[in-house]
Image (cartoon, helix red, strand yellow):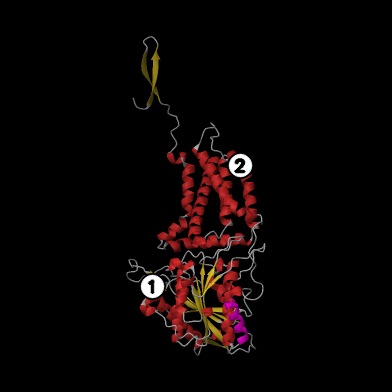
Amino acid sequence: MRGGTKLLLWNEQSSSVSEKEIPERADAPSPAPWWSRHANSLALVGGFLLAFGEIVLNLLSGDDVVDAVWPHAVRSLGWTMALRASPALPFTLAMVLGIAAFFGRGLVQRSPHQGRLEVGLHTAVGFLLGLLSIHFVMDAAYLRGAFLLLPTLYGWTLAVLLVVVGGLPTWRSTETGAFSWPKTAHLVGVFFAAWLVMPGIPALVGMAPAPPDAPRIGYGSTPGPYDTLQFSSPYTLPEAVVAVQGDLEDDVTFSVHLTLPDLPDDTPLATVPLAVLLHGFGYPDVDAYQAWITHLAAKGIAVAFLQYPSDLRPEGHESFDERYEEGTSNFLQHTYRNLSVRAAMDHLEMLALREPRDERIDQAIGDVMIDPSSLWVGGHSLGAAYTFLSLDEAFDRGWGQHALVVALEAPASRPMQVELQHDFTRMPTNTLVQIAVSEDDMSVGICPGAFHQQQFASLPEERNQLIVVRTDKYGFPRLVASHYMQTDPAHDRLSDWGFYRRIDAQADYIVAQGRNDTFTADFAFQYMTDETMLTGMGQWEDGTPVLPLKLFHDGLNTDAMFEACT
């Protein structure tokens, strides 16, 4: 009989069992749906996946993995830098969260909406675990343990949420006292949160020694002596480049961004030198290089920041067989970016070096001319690799014949193609090359820079420098030599000491050469070639020296650090 329940009855006289059908009550509650019974677990998983939502959407829109993660990476970097700048902030947040944990559990249990609140809390726990997962992946790939307080704050927040959700940790069931898998998972989660918090405690309470302050005077201090003015002038990309452009840089108007020193009306100067700076792959953002640009321009240099496209998709690029050999690579895109760089230099010449030049230059520096015979040329990452292209083009135009500084920062592999090779026999006597690689560069590594040094082997050894910027995690904030230390978002004390001091000295040298100021030129040259002055990095707050830079004149052939490169 359908719709009822069978009841078994015992008949003592016959010692038999009989069945009696008991009608089912119409008002008996039906079982809860499965998603309701597992609402908290689903919320936990949903929150975890939500943390990856932006990255997934970027991937679906056509971004590659690096571009998809980049907005989150920059945002996390901003949070971290804010926490680093004010240790009192995470300490205050920790106290507020601690108070929330103390009262939160009771409020949840007494709330008439306890079920909904627990779903929301489980979603928050999952979301936080997702953020931690992204952080660990980024840390392994790029950050290399540089950032301490963000995972510390994540850990403390996780501990608070777990206490509010499940109370004090235990592996036994509250009702039965027996072993419980959910309680054990809760206990493990609390211990995991504590593990995240522990490394940051010395920083939170002020026990970890601070790195040296930025230099107050001299190289690496406030840019000067001039203020600066900046304007942009779009240039036309070659048709061959436009034909292979992707859509990831549709919002970029490729331009020459020119930054000039704001010279006084009564300046005795007749000329200022020229600097040509190239950005890294996928980073045509002039705002990310403002500090670098300003340190050069404020010394008295006209600085041209050239944008070139990264997202290029020539025919066959998807199935192309990529090769890397001795600091070179064979990417198809090299050819098209070379066309772009040279087009930008054409525009720069029309903009600033020929008459009539852009009237905004006259407004900034009056009758002073921009003289490219004293030339600074350099770049970051792929821009450093393409410095070989821009320098070769500069020589073709007759630039850099009086004095030259070449600055390759965290350089990537340069083009392998025969038609993109350079002729450096035209370097002037007054040439200085500084190639800087970062110890924890997880993007391009240290090998391309070591191979690039060999391209300048004709120079006297003191003028051909390979510099390794080292990681030092002794105190707080940790000083980690990453791929991005030359950019504004990653500007820290390691940048002040290991990068901007050198940029100031390079600028002083090229400006002094342009003015035939031998005293200043000799001082800057001595600073950059004296190993003690160049490599010293100041002291931690307790007097412990920060690990110095390493200087090599033939790194590839003389030091075990580069053995893996060959």
Mark 1 is on which residue type?
Answer: Gln
What range of the chain is rendered magenta?
A: 518-530
Residue 528 colored in magenta in the image: yes
Q: Which of marks 2 and 1 is nearer the N terminus?
A: 2
Of residues 18 and 133, which is closer to you in this image?
A: 133
Residue at (60% x, 78% y) in the render: 527
In the depicted structure, whether residue 181 falls above or below residue 458? above
In what element is the residue under mark 1?
Answer: helix
- In the image, is residue 66 above or below residue 161? below
Image point 45% across, 63% down: which residue?
A: 66
Q: Which residue is drawn at 49% across and 65% down?
A: 441
Image coordinates for residue 296, horizontal then vertical, percent: 57, 78
> Which residue lies under the disc numbered 2?
107
Q: Is residue 327 magenta?
A: no
Quick check: 225 left or right of 27?
right
Q: Position of residue 264 (x, y in %)?
A: 64, 85
Please determine whether, in this image, residue 5 is positioned above or below residue 124: above
Helix, strand or loop for disc 2: helix
The amino acid type found where label 2 is placed reads Leu
Q: Can residue 346 be seen?
A: no
Instruction: Tell me, yes or no, if residue 419 can be seen here.
Output: yes
- State the quadrant of the C terminus: bottom left
Q: Is residue 510 shown above or below 84?
A: below
Of tags 2 and 1, which is closer to the observer?
1
Number of residues whose C-alpha sits closer than 10 Å to that of mark 2, classed few (under 14), some (14–19) or many (20 or more):
some
Where residue 462 appears, as percent x and y from the top left, is 54, 79
Judging by the rendered image, the residue that carries numbered circle 1 is 333
| Distance Cα–Cα, label 2 vs label 1 | 60 Å
View extreme (top): residue = 13
User: Which of the 4 image quadrants contains residue 521?
Assistant: bottom right
Q: Residues within 10 Å of mark 1 (few under 14, many from 20)?
A: some
The residue lying toward the viewer, choosing from 560 and 3, is 560
